Image (cartoon, helix red, strand yellow):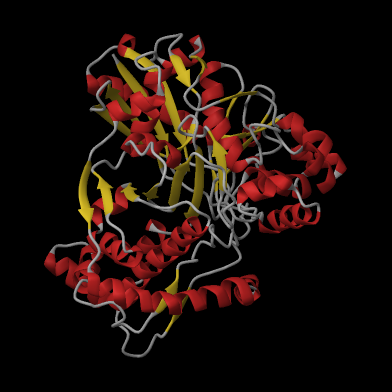
């Protein structure tokens, strides 16, 4: 028997069929037809989007189910009877507004021109004002639950996005029956009933396993909002590792799966990676590295950690609290810079028959830490942790007329590593001691200089997983549990986990140099991020 895992990312959905030992039998990747929508709505090119909007089309997700699943079954040369269960991992917080039948509001004629009716992707950052309103109100009321979110509220989360809709599109808000995380929406579509995950609710919707939603706080924000929002968050809440339900006949016909196939409770994609690589013990820090990075830890005890993105019990491993922090621009940042290099570098790469990325990598590897005289801030997509401020933007200090493209590139790699060290130190200062560091995702396998820089800056060995599909494997593990192949998350994860392929070890001389450079970075980080954050906000508004 096999399980099927679907990993919905920012640009595409990946369907994996995996056996009980963790071997991937087939993979099908379905790019989102509409991609990330940042300029104008699909309904009309005249509907120009405001700054910081990042939307998606819900039909792209359904296409993953209806195209990707049959293709994966065909490539595996198996029938649907061989699939024991289905697991869903989804990038989060990605929020849909739907009617009572779970039909997205953007598909209705009267709402298709309203940007708030479309899916708000995790990197939709236009609700910064609403996130600050929530944070200030929570601090004034001394809300106890705020400590579980590092005393910060992120514009990426569900509540700021919903409050943004309440203020800016009241008619849409009134007509919306459910606000739901995209991963939970997929599970609900497959099973025909609204089932929400404790993972997505706990990290992205201010929900707590003991007290539920802070409904009194919702009312303190706005009485009308407080009276209506809890109803829009209703549904059965289940834990990761449980079965959500079974595939309906309608969805069986559309996907090629067998009616009644068990479906697991959804999980956030980064968190799913912990299962995929077998990081099931406390004191292990896992970096899930892609367009952005999540820094995840598990621990037996609850601890207050300033500036993190949340802590939720049983969110991944039963009996353990999972802690999350993150960076908003990592792979996105390096990809952006590769598009900025001068023409002569493009020509040199073409003449050498290598990519721009490889050319920059080759040149930057010849540099030593500090040689460029540059220190950068990697806030090109705002700061998720530990400042939780998406009005911040990137910066570079020390540039001269002699600065080269490879020096800028190395500075961006170092900035990413320094930003990770800020998170790393924050965890350890709170008593979460890091004994092992793991890395998974696409970046660790194709950027050796980046990973060596991380090892040198953190002064830790970093073990890199061989798979680029840790999240999809994690989803298939949950599918295997829902389908009865395994009855325990730990057993399933250890049986199906993907091996590590390489370990990066700190270079002593580089560690010493980066310790000195990090002190400078910390000063710049605190000046622009804590003391004078309005400098970047003012520049952003004037853009």
**For residue 21, side relative to residue 40 (left or right):** left
Front-most of 79 and 500? 500
| Quadrant where the image shows the C terminus | bottom right
Q: Position of residue 429 (x, y in %)?
A: 50, 60
Going 75% across and 56% down the picture, which residue do you hit?
139
> Which of 62 and 310 lies nearest the eye of the viewer?
310
The residue at the far right in this view is 223
In the rendered image, the vertical position of residue 137 relative to residue 196, given as above or below: below
Q: Residue at x 56, y 36 (%)?
A: 200
Eyeballing the image, is 126 above or below 339?
A: above
Looking at this rendering, what residue extends furthest in the left direction? Answer: 352
Residue 18 visible? The answer is yes
Residue drawn at x 31%, y 59% as measured from the top left: 460
Residue 336 shown left or right of residue 251 in the figure? left
Q: Is residue 281 above or below residue 132?
A: above
- In x, y percent, where is residue 457? 34, 67
Specify the quadrant of the image occupied by residue 421. bottom left
**Could you tell me residue 484's position as x and y percent?**
39, 13
Residue 193 position in % (x across, y down): 60, 18
The answer to whether residue 342 is seen in the rendering is no
Q: Is residue 470 above or below residue 156?
A: above
């Amino acid at each position: 028997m096999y399980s099927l895992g679907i990993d919905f990312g920012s640009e595409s959905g990946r369907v994996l069929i995996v056996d009980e030992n963790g071997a991937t039998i087939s993979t099908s990747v379905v790019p989102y037809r509409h991609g990330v929508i940042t300029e104008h709505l699909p309904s009309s090119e005249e509907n120009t989007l405001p700054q910081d909007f990042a939307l998606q089309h819900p039909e792209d997700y359904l296409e993953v189910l209806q195209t990707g699943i049959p293709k994966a079954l065909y490539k595996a040369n198996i029938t649907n009877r061989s699939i024991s269960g289905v697991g869903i991992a989804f990038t989060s917080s990605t929020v849909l507004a739907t009617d009572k039948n779970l039909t997205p509001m953007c598909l209705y004629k009267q709402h298709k021109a309203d940007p708030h009716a479309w899916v708000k992707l995790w990197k939709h950052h236009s609700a910064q004002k609403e996130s600050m309103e929530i944070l200030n109100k929570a601090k004034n009321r001394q809300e106890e639950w705020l400590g579980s979110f590092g005393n910060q509220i992120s514009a990426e989360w569900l509540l700021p996005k919903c409050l943004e809709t309440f203020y800016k599109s009241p008619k849409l808000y009134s007509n919306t029956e459910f606000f739901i995380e995209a991963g939970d929406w997929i599970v609900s579509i497959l099973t025909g009933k609204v089932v929400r995950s404790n993972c997505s609710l706990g990290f992205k919707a201010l929900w707590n396993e003991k007290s539920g939603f802070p409904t009194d706080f919702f009312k303190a924000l706005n009485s009308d909002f407080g009276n209506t929002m809890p109803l829009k968050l209703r549904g059965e809440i289940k834990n990761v590792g449980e079965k959500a339900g079974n595939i309906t006949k309608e969805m069986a016909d559309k996907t090629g799966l067998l009616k009644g196939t068990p479906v697991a409770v959804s999980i956030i994609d980064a968190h799913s990676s912990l299962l995929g690589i077998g990081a099931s013990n406390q004191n292990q820090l896992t970096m899930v590295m892609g367009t952005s990075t999540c820094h995840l830890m598990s621990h037996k005890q609850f601890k207050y950690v300033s500036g993190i993105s949340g802590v939720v019990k049983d969110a991944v491993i039963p009996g353990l609290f999972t802690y999350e922090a993150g960076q908003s621009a990592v792979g996105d940042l390096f990809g952006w810079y590769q598009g900025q290099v001068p023409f002569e570098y493009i020509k040199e790469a073409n003449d050498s028959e290598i990519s721009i990325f490889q050319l920059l990598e080759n040149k930057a590897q010849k540099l030593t830490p500090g040689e460029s005289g540059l220190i950068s801030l990697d806030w090109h997509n705002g700061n998720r942790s530990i400042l939780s401020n998406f009005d911040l933007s990137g910066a570079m200090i020390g540039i001269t007329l002699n600065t080269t493209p490879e020096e800028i590139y190395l500075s961006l790699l170092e900035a990413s590593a320094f930003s990770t060290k800020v998170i790393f130190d924050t965890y350890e200062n709170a008593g979460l001691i890091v004994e092992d560091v793991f890395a998974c995702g696409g970046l660790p396998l194709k950027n050796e200089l980046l990973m060596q820089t991380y090892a040198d800056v953190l002064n830790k060995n970093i073990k890199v997983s061989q798979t680029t599909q840790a999240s999809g494997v994690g989803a298939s593990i949950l599918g295997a549990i829902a389908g009865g192949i395994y009855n325990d998350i730990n057993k399933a994860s250890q049986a199906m986990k993907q091996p590590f392929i390489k370990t990066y070890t700190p270079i002593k001389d580089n560690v010493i140099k980066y310790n000195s450079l990090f002190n400078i970075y910390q000063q710049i980080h605190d000046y622009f991020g804590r003391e004078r954050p309005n400098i970047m906000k003012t520049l952003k508004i004037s853009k």
